[in-house]
Image (tube, rainbow, N blue to C red):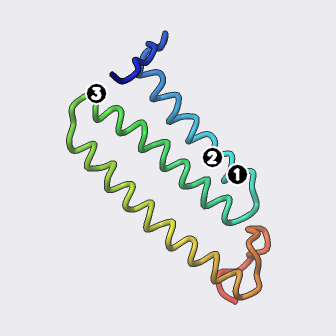
Amino acid sequence: MPPRLLPSPWGREVNALAVGLALFAAGLAAVVLRGQLLAMLLGLELMIAGVSVILTYEAGVFGDPAGLAAVVLIIAIAAAEAVVGLCLILGLHRAGLGGRAGSLTELRE
């Protein structure tokens, strides 16, 4: 028999929203406060994960299959964005420009 979870005094809604908002806030802090491109990309992924958590919970509460389909689409787009971002960061590193966002002043060199 699986162990029973203790009920939360605030309910599941507050927990799901708190986790989503915490992920979004951590991602936003990483994007704003960090100067490294890789840390900024990871922060962006955290922000997308936070939105996905909240959207998944809301779609489950309201029984909306279109919301769950939107979450799957968001996750697929986030994976593609991560691949493109990592490729760009590797290209900058190979060109000797480093991984700092402040060192990039032009789009083309």
Q: Residues within 10 Å of mark 1 (few under 14, many from 20)?
A: few
Residue placed furthest toward the right? 103
Tell me whether circle 1 and circle 2 mark residues in contact (CB < 8 Å).
yes
> Where in the figure is residue 103, as x and y percent of width and height?
79, 74
Sequence-wise first label, 3 or 2: 2
Front label number (3 vs 1): 3
Instruction: Assign the N terminus to one quadrant of the image.
Output: top left
Q: Which residue is mark 3?
A: 61
Looking at the rendered structure, which numbered label has been put on residue 49? none
Q: Residue at the location (48% across, 66% down)?
A: 81
Does 41 sit left or right of 98 as displayed? Answer: left
Placement of 12 over or under 65, stated as above or below: above
Which image quadrant is residue 78 in?
Answer: bottom left
Q: Residues within 10 Å of mark 3 (few under 14, many from 20)?
A: few
- What's the distance in space between the residues labelled 3 and 1, CA to CA? 32 Å
Tell me whether circle 3 and circle 1 mark residues in contact (CB < 8 Å).
no
> Where in the figure is residue 73, as x and y percent of width and height?
32, 56
- What's the distance in space between the residues labelled 3 and 2, CA to CA? 26 Å
Q: Secondary structure at mark 3?
A: helix
Q: Secondary structure at mark 2?
A: helix
Q: How many marks?
A: 3
Q: Residue at the location (54% across, 48% down)?
A: 47
Amino acid carrying label 2: it is Leu
Tell me whether circle 3 and circle 2 mark residues in contact (CB < 8 Å).
no
Looking at the rendered structure, which numbered label has been put on residue 28? 2
In the image shown, does 1 or 42 lie closer to the viewer?
A: 1
Q: Residues within 10 Å of mark 2 (few under 14, many from 20)?
A: some
Instruction: Assign the C terminus to one quadrant of the image.
Output: bottom right
Amino acid carrying label 1: it is Val
Q: Which residue is mark 1?
A: 32
Sequence-wise first label, 3 or 1: 1
Amino acid carrying label 3: it is Val
